[in-house]
Amino acid sequence: MDITLDPPRGITGFLLGMPAEEVKAAAAALGRVTVQDDGLAGEFAYMKVTALHPQFEIVFHLEDGRTLTAAEVWTPRPGEDAITVRYGGLDVFTTPARQLLDRLRADGHAVIDKTQYAYVPDLPLGFTRTAGHEVPLDGDGEPLYFQAVLVAGAGYYDYMR
């Protein structure tokens, strides 16, 4: 299975702006679905739909309680399926984090690198290296590879510029 990141439009099968019921139905095709705060749109809590596949998770953020505003893909786990998550021809979770950020810079994107987290406001993409399990480490002591990536709509990270 290939999941392509297409910021600021969404990811494979999930366009930002999709109605909540369509998100739930499409997520169910990927695995077990959980829904948190159904219909809620608050500053500190809002609706999330999580697709739990045996090898990966995707958290769909519906910050307005009605439509998809961001999709957060977590690194695939080993298993029977070959799963890749790609952006610009690179596998986001098998390309070393610093190399991926260098590529984004070389492509002309401003990258805000906070070591554990990185943001590319003009795409908009957000990455995390934080891991809750044993993973290979880079020379800076952080995970060598990103552990999650969030794809959002235009303007999502503008406050960081």
Image: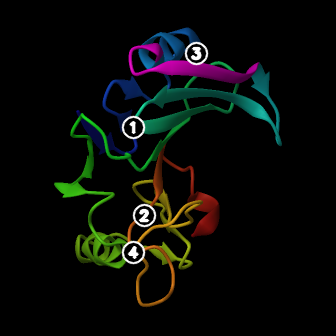
**Earlier-in-chain disc, 2 versus 1:** 1
Q: How crowded is the residue under tag 2: few (<14 C-alpha within 10 Å), some, or many (20+)?
A: many
- Say which residue label 1 marks: 55
Residue plotted at (24% across, 34% down): 81
Amino acid at the residue labelled 3: Ala
**Earlier-in-chain disc, 1 versus 4:** 1
Amino acid at the residue labelled 4: Leu
**Earlier-in-chain disc, 1 versus 3:** 3
Q: Is 112 situated above or below 120? A: below
Q: Is 132 situated above or below 21? A: below
For marks 1 and 4, give the CA distance: 20 Å
- Say which residue label 3 marks: 20
Please name which of the two marks, 2 or 1, marks the residue nearer to the observer. 1
- Say which residue label 4 marks: 144
Q: Is 38 situated above or below 109? A: above
Please name which of the two marks, 1 or 4, marks the residue nearer to the observer. 1
**SS category of the residue bearing label 2:** loop
Foreground residue, 135 or 10? 135
Magenta-drawn segment = 28-38
For marks 2 and 3, give the CA distance: 28 Å
Image color mode = rainbow
Q: Residue 73 lies in what quarter of the image?
A: top left
**SS category of the residue bearing label 1:** loop
Mark identifier at residue 146:
2
Foreground residue, 159 or 32? 32
Q: Main secondary structure of the magenta part?
A: strand
**Earlier-in-chain disc, 2 versus 3:** 3
Amino acid at the residue labelled 1: Gln
Amino acid at the residue labelled 2: Phe
